[in-house]
Image (tube, rainbow, N blue to C red):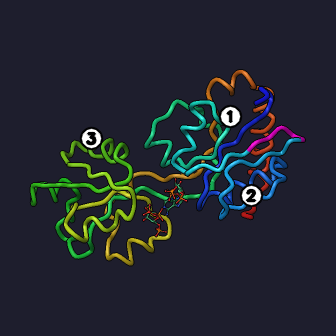
Amino acid sequence: MAVDWITFALPKGRLLPFATGLLRDAGLLRTEIDGNGRRLVYRDEERGLRYLICRAADVPTFVEYGAADLGVAGKDVILEQGKDICELLDLGFGECRFVVAVPASRLELFKDGLAGYLARCGQLRVATKFPRVAELYLRSRGLPGEIIRLSGNIELAPLVGLAEVIIDLVSTGRTLRENNLVAVEDIAVATARLVANRVFYQVKNDQLLALVEAVRKTLERGVQEC
Ligand SMILES: Nc1ncnc2c1ncn2[C@@H]1O[C@H](COP(=O)(O)OP(=O)(O)OP(=O)(O)O)[C@@H](O)[C@H]1O
Ligand SMILES: O=P(O)(O)OC[C@H]1O[C@H](OP(=O)(O)OP(=O)(O)O)[C@H](O)[C@@H]1O
């Protein structure tokens, strides 16, 4: 790989249309990327730009290890992983929030918050895909609790007695509603971020700054999903 190529790690899935729309508007993407396809690497030879289609949670890893210079990653994943990468821009899209949610049928038990629940019931198990965020949250509240890490469909856990509460991402609220859960506490809002490899951001500073500036100007104008 020539050193002057610039590689973007893009998240497949729900963030991809926004990320590609933004890069296209910024003049940094001319290739068609098929979000539903199996192809994982796209190149714009003329401009020396390369795009990697990564799992959303893997973008920080590709960037931290220098397999990509720049990447688009959710703040949720950034908070959870604590990777050594530079966060350059808040891209605004992919907004969701970390919440604590409980079964609506048990809401009364949580009327004095998680601390009140613990005092009443003596046990707090938290199912989540984000154990670090959950751990930090419990610690910041001085709450003892067991974190149960799941890979997805977190909402299932309190419905079958695997956990008393969940800590998960919510955007439309549909998944909570359809599983008779309610959010009782908000933890943090997350949006997609433009991130960079720490070393490359210094070494290729002129090249990367020009790209970051193009993205920043596009954000100021407003982004189209494509
Ligand atoms: N309601 C939401 N739930 C989860 N992630 C959301 C939501 N809304 C926006 N996002 C953003 O989308 C990213 C996850 O994208 P996506 O759901 O496509 O991947 P994933 O399901 O976590 O990963 P994969 O399919 O690779 O296991 C999150 O990191 C977050 O930044
Ligand atoms: O508020 P909503 O719009 O309903 O979105 C929230 C849901 O989306 C995410 O799950 P995802 O779709 O990523 O699937 P997963 O459970 O397999 O992680 C999240 O974990 C919630 O389950």
Residue range (magenta) = 46-50
Coordinates of residue 163 in the picture (x, y in percent): 22, 60
| Secondary element type, mark 2 | loop
At horizontal 46% and vertical 57% (from top left) the residue drawn is: 97
- Label 2 vs label 3: CA separation? 42 Å
Q: Residue furthest front?
A: 38
Q: Is residue 152 above or below residue 179?
A: above
Is residue 81 covered in magenta? Answer: no
Tell me the residue that label 1 is attached to.
Answer: 69
At horizontal 57% and vertical 32% (from top left) the residue drawn is: 64
Which amino acid, mark 1?
Answer: Asp
Q: Who comes first in sequence, dot 2 or dot 3?
A: 2
At horizontal 45% and vertical 40% (from top left) the residue drawn is: 81
94 vs 155, left or right, is: right
Q: Which mark is residue 33?
A: 2
Q: Pick the residue in front: 137 or 30.
A: 30
Residue 128 image-quadrant placement: bottom left
Which amino acid, mark 3?
Answer: Arg
At horizontal 30% and vertical 43% (from top left) the residue drawn is: 135
Coordinates of residue 73 in the picture (x, y in percent): 58, 47
Tell me the residue that label 3 is attached to.
Answer: 139
- Label 2 vs label 1: CA separation? 19 Å
- Label 1 vs label 3: CA separation? 34 Å
